[in-house]
Image (tube, grey):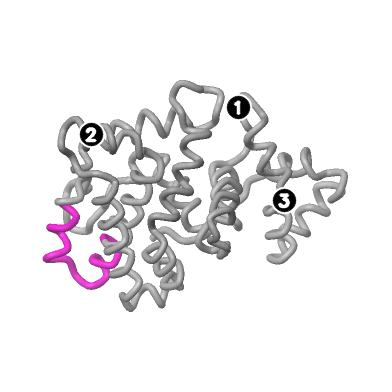
Amino acid sequence: MIQPNCRVQFAAEDVDFILSILGRRIGDGECLVRLLSDERSRDLILDDEALFRALLERRGCLRVSSRFYFYILVRKVFRRSGIQDRAVADYVAEVLAEFAQAERARCIVPGRDKPLDYFFEMLTALQTADDRTSFHIRAHIGNYSLFLSGVFPDRIRFRAERRGFPDLKYYEEMGRAQYRAARDHRLAQRYELAPIFNTLSERFETTRLALNDIADRLFSISDPDYPLGTLLSLDQGESLSGSE
């Protein structure tokens, strides 16, 4: 189950990166580690505009973890879009970090030999799934809808216009409905995900457009200098061809 854990899973290279940008204001590594261990000071540091600019402006291979990378970017574009809840940005950043690995984007259902790769398979599985499994499937459909429509909107538009495949409206409606259903499930309260699913359901289009902004800047296959761009464009772009 994906949780908003990006802010507590940063790696040593993330600390080094922060020091390289904010070191004069923060001090040494030991001081930074202490600050990052405190939730309030950690969140203030991660909201620093200088970190966001550095991720955009530094060319070549960035030595940062995918969770740090995605959280800084998602948090910034979400704030610009009026989504201020850090937990929502953290959750979506975790979705991107997980789904950047093609295998993690597949829906695993207990008792089935193969993962579910298509929405129609997931919706069919819901008809016979037990309570816990149905919750996981609904959350996965919401996450997958947001990921595909957020990172690959141009591919969806092309396939919809040229081949009659589902358009962005379909993905928005699918994601919104499944996030809403997951929000109302009893396990959403147990996992403390109900408020996050509520925001993603009510503001699906806003979150999708914010992710489009990131994709437009960073995930172009024609620009290999950006980290994770090739991975996202090739692995997940190809899997989209079979999403419906």
User: Which secondary structure is most common in the magenta stretch?
Assistant: helix
Q: Amino acid at mark 2?
A: Arg
Q: With 130 as the anchor, is 210 left or right in this view? A: right
Identify the residue at horizontal 56%, vertical 65% (top origin). Answer: 85
Viewer-closest of 190 and 118: 118
Which one is nearer the viewer's eye here, 88 or 117? Answer: 88
Identified at 82% across, 52% down, the residue is 30
Q: Position of residue 81 (x, y in %)?
A: 53, 55
Left or right of 122? Residue 55 is: right
- Residue 25 lies, in percent from the top left, at 86, 49
Q: In the picture shown, does residue 67 fall above or below 1?
A: above
Q: Position of residue 130 (x, y in %)?
A: 19, 70
- Choose top left, top right, bottom left or bottom right for residue 61: top right
Q: State the quadrant of the C terminus.
A: top left
| Callout 1 amino acid | Cys
1 or 3: tag closer to the N-terminus: 3
The segment highlighted magenta reads 121-137
The label number, if any, that marks residue 190 in the structure image: none
Question: On residue 48, which mark appears?
Answer: 3
What separation in Å lies between label 1 and label 3 (alpha carbons)? 21 Å
Question: Between 29 and 230, which is closer to the camera in this rendering?
Answer: 230
The N terminus appears in which quarter of the rendering? bottom left
* Measured Cα–Cα span from mark 2 to mark 3: 39 Å
Q: Locate residue 59, reporting x and y percent.
A: 64, 25
Q: Is residue 165 left or right of residue 190?
A: left
Q: Residue at x 46, y 61 (%)?
A: 3
User: In the rendered image, which residue does mark 2 sit on?
Assistant: 159
Q: Which residue position holds label 1?
A: 61
Does the segment drawn in magenta span residue 129? yes
On the image, which quarter does residue 84 sit in?
bottom right
The local secondary structure at tag 2 comes to helix
